[in-house]
Image (cartoon, grey):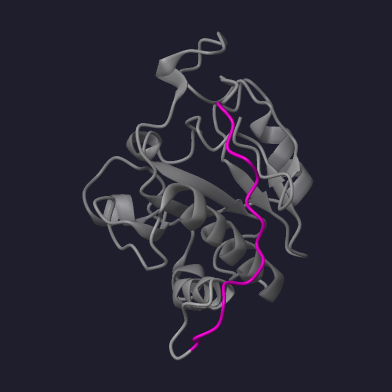
Amino acid sequence: MALWTDLATWRGPTVNSGDGDRNPNEASDRMVEHRGIVLHIAEGYFDGTIAWQKNPTARVSSHFVIAKDGRIAQMVDTDIRSWAQRSGNPTWLSVENEGFVPGGLTAQQIEANARLLVRAHQIYDIPLQIATSPSGRGLGHHSMGAESGVNWGHPQCPGHAIIAQKPEIVSRAQELCGSGSGSGSEPAPVPVPERRRPRWIIEP
Protein backbone atom coordinates (compact mmCIF):
# COMPACT_ATOMS: atom_id res chain seq x y z
CA MET A 1 0.00 0.00 0.00
CA ALA A 2 1.48 3.36 -1.05
CA LEU A 3 0.30 5.71 1.67
CA TRP A 4 2.54 8.67 2.42
CA THR A 5 1.53 8.98 6.05
CA ASP A 6 4.63 10.92 7.07
CA LEU A 7 3.53 13.72 4.73
CA ALA A 8 -0.24 13.31 4.64
CA THR A 9 -3.12 12.22 6.86
CA TRP A 10 -4.98 9.24 5.45
CA ARG A 11 -8.62 10.28 4.90
CA GLY A 12 -9.65 7.49 2.53
CA PRO A 13 -10.67 5.11 1.29
CA THR A 14 -13.16 6.25 -1.30
CA VAL A 15 -15.08 4.05 -3.72
CA ASN A 16 -14.48 6.76 -6.34
CA SER A 17 -11.18 5.24 -7.41
CA GLY A 18 -9.67 2.32 -9.27
CA ASP A 19 -12.05 0.65 -11.74
CA GLY A 20 -15.12 1.55 -9.69
CA ASP A 21 -16.50 -1.95 -9.13
CA ARG A 22 -15.74 -1.87 -5.38
CA ASN A 23 -13.84 -5.14 -5.59
CA PRO A 24 -10.37 -4.77 -4.06
CA ASN A 25 -7.08 -6.31 -5.18
CA GLU A 26 -7.69 -6.13 -8.92
CA ALA A 27 -5.07 -5.28 -11.52
CA SER A 28 -7.62 -3.03 -13.25
CA ASP A 29 -7.51 -0.64 -10.28
CA ARG A 30 -3.82 0.10 -10.70
CA MET A 31 -2.01 3.03 -12.21
CA VAL A 32 -0.45 2.09 -15.57
CA GLU A 33 2.52 4.39 -14.96
CA HIS A 34 3.38 7.53 -13.01
CA ARG A 35 4.14 10.39 -15.40
CA GLY A 36 3.80 13.18 -12.86
CA ILE A 37 1.54 15.17 -10.57
CA VAL A 38 -1.41 17.20 -11.82
CA LEU A 39 -2.42 20.38 -9.98
CA HIS A 40 -6.15 21.03 -9.52
CA ILE A 41 -8.17 23.73 -7.78
CA ALA A 42 -10.90 22.28 -5.57
CA GLU A 43 -13.45 25.07 -6.05
CA GLY A 44 -14.18 24.38 -2.42
CA TYR A 45 -12.81 24.06 1.09
CA PHE A 46 -10.53 21.40 2.55
CA ASP A 47 -12.95 19.33 4.63
CA GLY A 48 -15.80 19.81 2.16
CA THR A 49 -13.61 18.51 -0.67
CA ILE A 50 -12.67 15.44 1.36
CA ALA A 51 -16.31 14.74 2.21
CA TRP A 52 -17.38 15.16 -1.43
CA GLN A 53 -14.71 12.76 -2.66
CA LYS A 54 -15.99 10.11 -0.25
CA ASN A 55 -19.56 10.50 -1.54
CA PRO A 56 -20.28 7.72 -4.08
CA THR A 57 -22.56 10.03 -6.09
CA ALA A 58 -19.73 12.53 -6.63
CA ARG A 59 -17.75 10.18 -8.89
CA VAL A 60 -14.60 12.20 -8.31
CA SER A 61 -11.45 11.84 -6.24
CA SER A 62 -7.83 12.88 -6.09
CA HIS A 63 -4.79 11.26 -4.56
CA PHE A 64 -4.24 14.26 -2.28
CA VAL A 65 -6.08 17.33 -1.01
CA ILE A 66 -4.06 20.29 0.31
CA ALA A 67 -5.50 22.89 2.68
CA LYS A 68 -4.58 26.56 2.49
CA ASP A 69 -2.57 26.12 5.71
CA GLY A 70 -0.52 23.32 4.13
CA ARG A 71 -2.21 20.29 5.67
CA ILE A 72 -2.23 17.33 3.30
CA ALA A 73 -4.90 14.64 3.18
CA GLN A 74 -4.41 11.46 1.16
CA MET A 75 -7.59 10.05 -0.35
CA VAL A 76 -6.31 7.35 -2.73
CA ASP A 77 -3.32 5.03 -2.65
CA THR A 78 -0.71 6.35 -5.10
CA ASP A 79 -0.64 2.99 -6.88
CA ILE A 80 -4.40 3.21 -7.54
CA ARG A 81 -6.14 5.45 -10.10
CA SER A 82 -8.00 8.44 -8.74
CA TRP A 83 -10.87 10.02 -10.70
CA ALA A 84 -9.48 13.47 -11.35
CA GLN A 85 -8.54 13.98 -15.00
CA ARG A 86 -10.50 11.43 -17.03
CA SER A 87 -8.19 9.81 -19.61
CA GLY A 88 -5.21 10.96 -17.56
CA ASN A 89 -6.26 8.98 -14.50
CA PRO A 90 -4.21 5.85 -15.24
CA THR A 91 -0.95 7.75 -15.67
CA TRP A 92 -0.94 10.86 -13.46
CA LEU A 93 -1.20 11.48 -9.73
CA SER A 94 -3.62 14.24 -8.74
CA VAL A 95 -3.67 16.98 -6.11
CA GLU A 96 -6.73 19.09 -5.31
CA ASN A 97 -5.82 22.41 -3.69
CA GLU A 98 -8.32 24.16 -1.43
CA GLY A 99 -9.43 27.40 -3.07
CA PHE A 100 -11.35 28.96 -5.92
CA VAL A 101 -10.49 30.24 -9.40
CA PRO A 102 -8.95 32.76 -10.05
CA GLY A 103 -7.03 32.53 -6.76
CA GLY A 104 -3.51 31.20 -6.43
CA LEU A 105 -1.83 28.88 -3.95
CA THR A 106 -0.72 30.01 -0.52
CA ALA A 107 2.94 29.74 0.48
CA GLN A 108 2.00 26.71 2.58
CA GLN A 109 0.32 25.02 -0.37
CA ILE A 110 3.36 25.66 -2.55
CA GLU A 111 5.54 23.98 0.08
CA ALA A 112 3.16 21.03 0.44
CA ASN A 113 2.98 20.49 -3.34
CA ALA A 114 6.77 20.65 -3.55
CA ARG A 115 7.10 17.96 -0.89
CA LEU A 116 4.66 15.71 -2.71
CA LEU A 117 6.61 16.23 -5.93
CA VAL A 118 9.83 15.28 -4.13
CA ARG A 119 8.27 12.08 -2.82
CA ALA A 120 6.92 11.22 -6.29
CA HIS A 121 10.42 11.79 -7.65
CA GLN A 122 11.94 9.52 -5.01
CA ILE A 123 9.43 6.68 -5.39
CA TYR A 124 8.38 6.83 -9.04
CA ASP A 125 11.32 8.68 -10.62
CA ILE A 126 9.06 11.55 -11.67
CA PRO A 127 11.38 14.33 -12.87
CA LEU A 128 11.51 17.64 -11.02
CA GLN A 129 10.44 19.66 -14.03
CA ILE A 130 7.40 21.39 -15.49
CA ALA A 131 5.06 19.39 -17.72
CA THR A 132 2.90 21.27 -20.22
CA SER A 133 1.05 18.38 -21.92
CA PRO A 134 -0.21 14.89 -21.05
CA SER A 135 2.69 13.43 -23.02
CA GLY A 136 5.20 15.14 -20.76
CA ARG A 137 6.49 14.22 -17.33
CA GLY A 138 6.82 16.23 -14.15
CA LEU A 139 4.51 18.82 -12.57
CA GLY A 140 1.43 19.34 -14.72
CA HIS A 141 -1.90 21.14 -14.41
CA HIS A 142 -5.42 19.96 -15.14
CA SER A 143 -6.21 22.19 -18.13
CA MET A 144 -3.12 21.04 -20.03
CA GLY A 145 -5.29 18.15 -21.20
CA ALA A 146 -7.82 20.41 -22.90
CA GLU A 147 -4.97 22.62 -24.12
CA SER A 148 -3.56 19.54 -25.88
CA GLY A 149 -6.89 18.32 -27.25
CA VAL A 150 -7.07 15.42 -24.79
CA ASN A 151 -10.14 14.44 -22.79
CA TRP A 152 -9.08 15.55 -19.33
CA GLY A 153 -12.11 17.77 -18.65
CA HIS A 154 -12.34 21.17 -16.87
CA PRO A 155 -10.35 23.51 -19.14
CA GLN A 156 -10.47 26.27 -16.51
CA CYS A 157 -8.80 24.22 -13.76
CA PRO A 158 -6.64 25.19 -11.90
CA GLY A 159 -6.55 28.71 -13.39
CA HIS A 160 -3.78 30.99 -14.62
CA ALA A 161 -2.60 32.02 -11.15
CA ILE A 162 -1.74 28.46 -10.10
CA ILE A 163 -0.25 27.59 -13.49
CA ALA A 164 2.07 30.58 -13.05
CA GLN A 165 3.20 29.14 -9.69
CA LYS A 166 4.42 25.85 -11.14
CA PRO A 167 8.03 27.08 -11.54
CA GLU A 168 8.09 28.04 -7.87
CA ILE A 169 6.89 24.58 -6.83
CA VAL A 170 9.47 22.84 -9.01
CA SER A 171 12.24 25.15 -7.79
CA ARG A 172 11.34 24.40 -4.18
CA ALA A 173 11.25 20.65 -4.89
CA GLN A 174 14.70 20.87 -6.46
CA GLU A 175 15.91 22.76 -3.39
CA LEU A 176 14.52 20.07 -1.07
CA CYS A 177 16.33 17.45 -3.13
CA GLY A 178 19.53 19.44 -3.16
CA SER A 179 19.39 19.64 -6.94
CA GLY A 180 18.69 23.34 -7.35
CA SER A 181 20.98 25.56 -9.37
CA GLY A 182 24.32 25.80 -7.63
CA SER A 183 23.06 23.88 -4.61
CA GLY A 184 25.74 21.26 -4.24
CA SER A 185 24.12 20.15 -1.00
CA GLU A 186 22.91 16.75 0.13
CA PRO A 187 19.22 15.99 -0.37
CA ALA A 188 16.99 17.36 2.35
CA PRO A 189 15.54 14.75 4.71
CA VAL A 190 12.20 13.96 3.12
CA PRO A 191 11.84 10.39 4.46
CA VAL A 192 10.65 7.69 2.11
CA PRO A 193 8.49 4.97 3.67
CA GLU A 194 9.08 1.36 2.80
CA ARG A 195 7.31 0.50 -0.46
CA ARG A 196 4.71 -2.17 0.13
CA ARG A 197 2.45 -3.93 -2.28
CA PRO A 198 -0.74 -1.91 -2.53
CA ARG A 199 -4.07 -2.83 -1.00
CA TRP A 200 -6.39 -2.07 -3.87
CA ILE A 201 -8.96 0.52 -3.14
CA ILE A 202 -11.47 0.92 -5.54
CA GLU A 203 -13.19 4.62 -11.71
CA PRO A 204 -14.59 3.68 -14.55
Quarter of the image for the N terminus: give it: top right
For this rendering, which residue is in front, 69 or 25? Answer: 25
The location of residue 75, given as percent across then percent down, is 65, 36
In this rendering, position of residue 36 left or right of residue 80: left
Residue in view at x 59 percent, y 62 percent: 113
Determine whether 163 is above or below 78 in the image: below
In this rendering, position of residue 131 left or right of residue 81: left
Residue in view at x 49 percent, y 86 percent: 184
The location of residue 56, given as percent across then percent down, is 63, 20
Q: Taking the image as drawn, is residue 118 in sight?
A: yes
Question: Start and end of the magenta stretch?
Answer: 183-197
Quarter of the image for the C terminus: give it: top left
The location of residue 125, given as percent across then percent down, is 41, 53
**Does the segment drawn in magenta span residue 161?**
no
For this rendering, which residue is in front, 66 or 160? Answer: 66
Determine whether 83 is above or below 177 in the image: above
* Residue at the limit of the structure toward the bottom, as seen here: 182
Residue in view at x 55 percent, y 78 percent: 175
Q: Taking the image as drawn, is residue 45 in sight?
A: no
In this rendering, position of residue 122 left or right of residue 201: left
**Does the segment drawn in magenta span residue 189?**
yes
Residue in view at x 74 percent, y 50 percent: 6
